Amino acid sequence: MAVKHPYAITLDVGTSRVNHTGSWRTLRPEYVDRLPPCNAACPAGEDIQGWLSHAEAGDYEQAFRALTRNNPLPAIMGRVCYHPCEGACNRAQIDEAVGINAVERFLGDLAIAKGWGFAAPEAETGKKVLVVGAGPAGLSAAYHLRRLGHAVVIREAGPLAGGMMRFGIPKYRLPRHIIDAEVKRITAMGVTLSLNDKVDDIEKAVTEGGFDAAFLAVGAHIAKRAYIPAAGAAKVLDAVSLLRSMEGEEPPLLGRRVVVYGGGNTALDVARTAKRLGAEEAIIVYRRTREKMPAHDFELEEALDEGISMKWLSTIKNVDGGTMQIEKMALDDKGFPQPTGEFETLEADSLVLALGQDVDLSLLDKCPGIEIENGVVKVSPNMMTGRRGVFAGGDMAPSERTVTVAVGHGKKAARHIDAFLRGADSQATDKHGLASFDRLNTWYYEDAPATVRPMITAARRVNTFEEVVGGLDETNALYEARRCLSCGNCFECDNCYGVCPDNAVIKLGPGQRFRIDYDYCKGCGLCAAECPCGAIDMVPEQL
Amino acid sequence: MNEAPKTMDAVQKLKFYQKGTHTVGNRLVSEAERNVQASIERSNSLTCGHRACQGCGEALGARYAIDAAMRAANNQLIAVNATGCLEVFTTPYPETSWQMPWLHSLFGNAAAVATGVAAAMRVTGKRTVRTVAQGGDGGTTDIGFGCLSGMFERNDDVLYICYDNEGYMNTGVQRSSATPPAARTATTPNLGPEPGNVFGTGKFVPKIAVAHDIPYVATASVADLHDLEAKVTKAMGFHGARYIHINVPCPLGWGAHSGDTIKLARLAIETGLFPVFEAEHGRITTVRKIRRRVPVTDYLKLQKRYAHLFKGAEPDPRVARIQAMADRNIADYGLMEG
Amino acid sequence: MLEQLEGSKAMARTIALCRPQVICAYPITPQTHIVEGVGELVRDGTLENCEFINVESEFAALSVAIGASAAGARAYTATASQGLLFMAEAVYNAAGLGLPIVMTLGNRAIGAPINIWNDHSDAMALRESGWIQLFAETNQEAADLHIIAFRLAEELSVPTMVCVDGFILTHAMERIDIPDQKIVDAYLPPYEPVQVLDVEHPMSIGAMVGPDAFTEVRYLQYYKQQTSFRLIETLSQQFAKLFGRVAGGLLRSYHTEDAEFVVVAMGSINGTIKDVIDEMRAEDIAIGLVSLVTFRPFPVRALQEALAHARDVLVIDKALDPGMGGPLASNVAIAFRNMDDAPNLHSAICGLGGRPVTKASLSRLFRQAMVQPWEGPHFLDLNDRVIAREIHRRGKARRAGPAAENILKILEREKAEKARAREAAEGAS
């Protein structure tokens, strides 16, 4: 080589690249993907972080598409989901949880406004699946099955699709045009919806209809009754029929003073509905304490706001005309309520029992092999009943009875039905380890408290069935989406690329993330330490 | 005046980026608004294969600063380097890690050599070519201080960048005038009744630089890249003498984990021990506020050079003295909000 | 055109003709008038396109020059004595980096005791730094050598020091010819560096070199100097042709053809020596002189040739290595190392700290060397009585105090005693 410049003292630029400092390394950084707690907590199996990342970039349609890969009902879920995702959200430990539910609703509403639909499947499989019930589980299963190319028929006993979403959730929480729009989007994919079409005998329906499989999701519509001795002209109703009758022409008459018995969300819904129907007073009687109440706290807060009163640690012993005898309870060591022998009376025009619902299992009577346990259908881990090819989910299967769980059931069942139809086992993919809070470097996130969704004032809302909780507009939806920490998954913040003192991180370009250049990486650990979302592990080198 | 912003959120949209605000990059903002270090096209003036220790703050600080200066100067930049770690780990024959014209002369003369380079650019008609000088704290606050002060007072067109790792690390961790009190070094050993460096000694050169009334002086940190790049860019917008003093933790010299380099730099700011500010023409113009204030123990405990402070069962009273230094900085520079 | 000028002024004007682009100025006697002079020429616009930088120390002065030179500018500075030592680190560095800086050294003694007058201690102190060192005999040559120095430095890419005797040359008014700019331009082309800091062709200059290559780097420095003798001669010849007078070269011989006794010396003292030689030649004494212009690289071969016929060589040093003697003598001795029938070498130290060297003293010295040579260095005009008393005094007390002050006291006392004796004698008469 010709010496171009003074020997040894002067050097050609960048020549140190021949010196592979990677040999110093004892620990190597490796990129990982961890399961974000929101996704882990979502009963519907949504990739929340995934769709939020599109929303963050302002690409709402892409966000909607990503969201609806798992859940076809974002506008509904954005209203009625109890959002366990937000309860699990790591951001809650910094300031407040990301308003995932609000963004979901924003996307759902935007999709309706923009008329975004679902594409029909590219190819038909030739298989035919019967879905019994057009509630959230049935609609979700139908949607997923249709996406997979199967022909789907939904048979619904009621006059309208929606199941409990329509007949159990008050309008002020879920306006009916939202249900209509999201159902229509599913039927538009080529799903057949047959209304007022009750299935009495599932075995017959499958066989005669020539179905390759069936998914049962008839819900739980039969109100549980408690034995309360009643005398005189006592007006005692159950919550299911009350809420159902709200969909009819004539609003039910409840009187000026209404007592609701129960502690679930339905009890709250009934009490709030009663207020809107003109009751001056709505009192919830519950046998345990606020802490033990199964209803969600935010719904209780809204109810209290609206002037609902609560009678804790109380049971109704009997009803005599407009008078109820109430026994005071006390919690024992195990937290169970025990009678105290202390009584008081309560005046009321009507009593609504909100004590839970049972499943109408009559359609299974003639189907051999299906087992019933605790009033619900027993299913295997792949959601199949004892009858081969018949799957079940939603409220009629053992689970927490929420719209979200039902939607998750629908999706899960669809996946297993698809596998069944293809003659394969559906293998659950290995889940990544949890992206726990301690893996985050929260320094890198700007302080940004959650956006509070607008609410109409309590005074105004108790007189109408207007939707109580408002939605986000584009500005604050974007703001809210950007509060996501992207726990456990690289969001291309460039930190690793920037903080490496050895230029040993290669940036691969938008959407491509990064690669470690092990020729030069000395294993200092700075990239892992400064990764905001905990997407880099330091792994010992093997000799 | 136009109508007021419709909602608070409209304002927040401009103000906040809930993710990426403090990170190196931010995929949500335009390429032009992003940091130099986020760019695939960054110059990597200091490229790989250099022999700095694992987690070297100086190697990082140098690339941060010089890449930013390169962008600001449209790659028309020459660097002069004082003797020290940065020089030794980047240019041992037969390899150099620099990808720009670079000159090393001596330990104590970087500022003067840079003056010469800048003068040469003027007389040879290359006025667009800019000059930076760089060195560690030893080469800047001690042996190179005369040349530095001379360059300042003549207002030579040089940006001098000091990478302050608080000691003579290249020679094996000896005390410099930038070594903080109580810190153990090879020449302030962990021996005797008051182990470590002596209280009431040392100097903070940024303040002295400000006293020269030069166009621009700033302190910066590898823990705040946005601030650092903005300052280098701003500095490059001035002609005349400019000084940027960058806090660069040294895992070896401080006895810290190599992955804690940026964390330590961050804690130095958040405790108040390292005030981050900028000054123009002799006056402090902006101060970077502390974001999440922490006690100095959070910072000290991560470093073996302070281990002697935490040996006994009783809290060492010198920790309170260090806290008092931080408190004084917070008061003097106004490092807290409001 | 001939003008009556102070040496410094003449040098300043000549340096300006060399079109330096960056000049670093820091005052130190006796060099100060030179940089002042160039500074004026920059200010009044005579020297265009030049950055005149007032630095804060000699260390900075040479450092600025290093930066400027590495970045492609012709750089110049000047210093003396303590200043040279203060920049010593940069002196070595400029040489190691091969930067063709030209620096005037107004030769001056080095303290302590502090002394602002002339000798060659400063140049000798850094004779191993890797610079070319040229010694001027006259003010004309002091000026001319700068033109040669720039050309030489830039052709070799080696820094060059023009050594001019402080006060004797720097402050003396003489008739000097300041050459025409056109001729200087013809002799000295614009600076074309062999390496330069260039954004178009970036490189790293000043790498750390370990045991694997350091010897080779040093050898290349040595090789460059050892192969530069012919160039130094050629540049001198070209200078003579263009400018019509002699300057530079390795050495100049004066009446050595038939001389058995040859004096070797550097700098302005050669003028006095020539006068003495002229006088001794009038007495038919076969004495000659070799006036050494180029001290570094040390022209061993040329010196051997010039002294081939001499039986005795007397080396005049204007510097002292207290542990060895005269540095020039030591160097000349090395030149004799492989000579057949090498001459006898005699060493004399003179003119330290500005002590005048008179013709009479030199004449006495030469004659003594011829008839009664001595061992080791001879200190010209040494006050033996003072030395004897000081040595005696020191022998008596460990804490005898500083020698310089004591010597001055002794001298004062002697002077007073003499004066009293004179008064007494006058009073008696």
Image (spheres, rainbow, N blue to C red):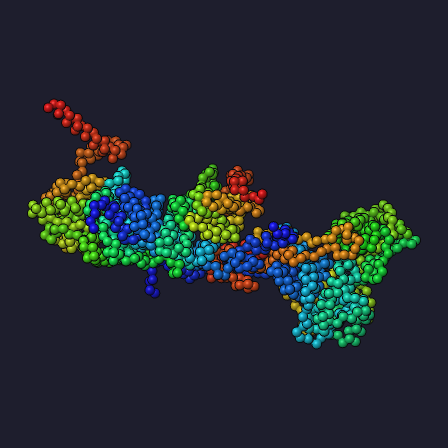
Q: Which residue is outermost to the left?
A: C284
* Position of residue C282 measured from the top left corner of the image (x, y, whole percent): 8, 46
Kindly tell me whether residue A38 is visible in this rendering: no
Going by the image, does B14 lie left or right of A278? left
Displayed quadrant of residue B298: top right
Q: x, y (%) of residue B214?
A: 43, 45
Which residue is pictured at 25% across the width and 46% down the height?
C9
Quarter holding the C terminus of chain B?
top right
Q: Is residue A376 left or right of residue B25?
A: right
Q: In this rendered view, identify the residue nearer to me: A248 or A463.
A: A463
- Residues C177 and C94: in front is C177
Instruction: Estimate the x, y position of residue A126 in percent, counting from the top left.
Output: 70, 76
Can see residue B137? yes
Q: Position of A368 compared to B331: left or right?
A: right
Residue ID at (40%, 56%): B129
Question: Is A427 drawn above or below residue B215 in the view shown?
Answer: below
Q: Quadrant of residue A470?
A: bottom right
Q: Residue at x 42, y 62 (%)?
A: A18
Extreme top residue here?
A: C428
Single out the residue that lies furthest toward the right. A232
- Residue in the picture at 35% in, 45% down: C55
Label total for image: 0
Q: Position of residue C238 (x, y in %)?
A: 21, 58
Q: On the rendered structure, is A261 left or right of B332?
A: right
